[in-house]
Amino acid sequence: MENSPLKVGDASAQESKKEEVKELVRMNISALQFKVLKQWGFARASLLTLPHGDVRTPVYMPVGTKGAMKGLLPKNMKDDIDCEIMLANTYHLFLKPGEEILDREGGLHKFAAWDKNYLTDSGGFQIVSLSDLNEVTEEGVTFESHIDKMKFLLTPERSMEVQNSIGADIMMALDDVVPPTITDADRLEEAMHRSVRWLDRCILAHKKPEVQNLFAIVQGGCDDDLRKICCDEMIKRNTPGYAIGGLAGGEDKEDFWRTVHTCTQLLPDDKPRYVMGIGYPVDILICSLLGADMYDCVYATRVARFGTVFTRNGEIKLRGSSNKNQFIPIDSKCQCYTCKNYTRSYLWQSFTRDSSCLQLLSLHNVYFLLDIIREFRQAILDENVEEYMTNFVTDYYITEKDGVPQWVKNALKAGGIDMS
Ligand SMILES: [Zn+2]
């Protein structure tokens, strides 16, 4: 991966680049409209208009690694699931098919036959989690491909080039990703400041701001002060939307919701807020209650492959033989194709011998997340959030010995709902 990095260390070049960034920020180019339709506490029901259509938020974005979901056709995604935006992974698309094919085909929408919206990540997170070797310097992230062991350097400029070729409606800035559980305070602070510097390089390298939206990513681990500094810096760059990164990595649940709360309080009201990597049903609703709008995670489809499915009474494992005589749908309220047509008993017996069963389970899990988030959105419009959330979490933890966990009650309280 060749690149044309900024001459790091050249003071006058740095100054002129800073001026260029400021000029671009002043131009305030955006390829989206975001309209908050109704607010309940911090929670918002909004309409996000992107180049490939409207997205009702809050929204969960299913992850179609290479532009399509494993086992689900784009037709399923539109007609059966009513999905308005999907996430695709830059790292995977860069390695295969690569920019040349994407450019020739006119971008991923056409290549993968998806005419609704895409969001692409920067590639950075996947490098850290998938490649065998990676090293971060001011220039970028050096990594070894997990396919053929080739060495590449991903810089902010290269990430923008690849994402411009993919043509996603929302693209993410390359950030310096560190786990939220990191104990090295200096490294955490360095990563936060570097993410700001890399955002500037992304802004300069982004070639299509009229048709593709670049989102900044707020970093800073679970340190409120670092998050505040980072929010402040990112807001100065005035990007069309903001992400809260570096969470869902094994941090304490109290730290998780508190960090989301800190950031949503600081980020502008008139721009979408995306919490990255969030995919548990309760986490999605809590972040929405605290004022976030967008989420993504592979959890729903990954666990479906092992027979784990969401219900309104928590997750269940379909492989268990107790399902043999259960002639009821996975979830009695769910209106997905799977729940309308199949019983737990059928899914249990077909699980290990029929690959279409995996599709049925993936479809249910993705539908379930989109469904509950739409219910929550409707609850905001109906001013019914307190009742909806209280009922949802009570039902969700009904089989737990201790009922609703304390962290959930604390997060709800911060969002204006007292369950204690
Ligand atoms: Zn279902």
Image (cartoon, helix red, strand yellow):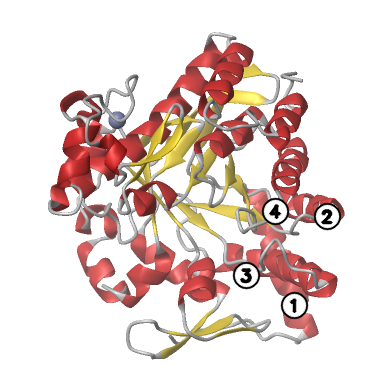
Quickly name the residue at label 3: 201
Nearer the camera: disc 1 or disc 3: 3
Secondary structure under the numbered disc 4 in the rendered image: loop
Q: Nearer the viewer, residue 386 or 296?
A: 386
Rendering quadrant holding ligand 1: top left
Mark closer to the chain start, 2 or 4: 2
Q: Position of residue 208 (x, y in %)?
A: 45, 58
Secondary structure under the numbered disc 3 in the rendered image: helix
Nearer the camera: disc 1 or disc 2: 2
Quickly name the residue at label 1: 14
Q: Tell me the residue at 71%/28% (across/down).
A: 409
C-alpha gap between disc 1 and disc 3:
10 Å
The quadrant of the picture occupied by the N terminus is bottom left
Q: Nearer the viewer, residue 226 or 345?
A: 345
Mark 1, ligand 1, within 8 Å: the answer is no
Mark 4, ligand 1, within 8 Å: the answer is no
Asked if one can make out residue 316 in the rendered structure from this viewpoint, the answer is yes
- Work out whether 374 lies above or below 400: above
**Disc 4 marks which amino acid?**
Arg
Quickly name the residue at label 4: 237
C-alpha gap between disc 2 and disc 4:
13 Å
**Disc 2 marks which amino acid?**
Ile
Nearer the camera: disc 1 or disc 4: 4
Query: Is label 1 in contact with label 4 (beta carbons under 8 Å)?
Result: no
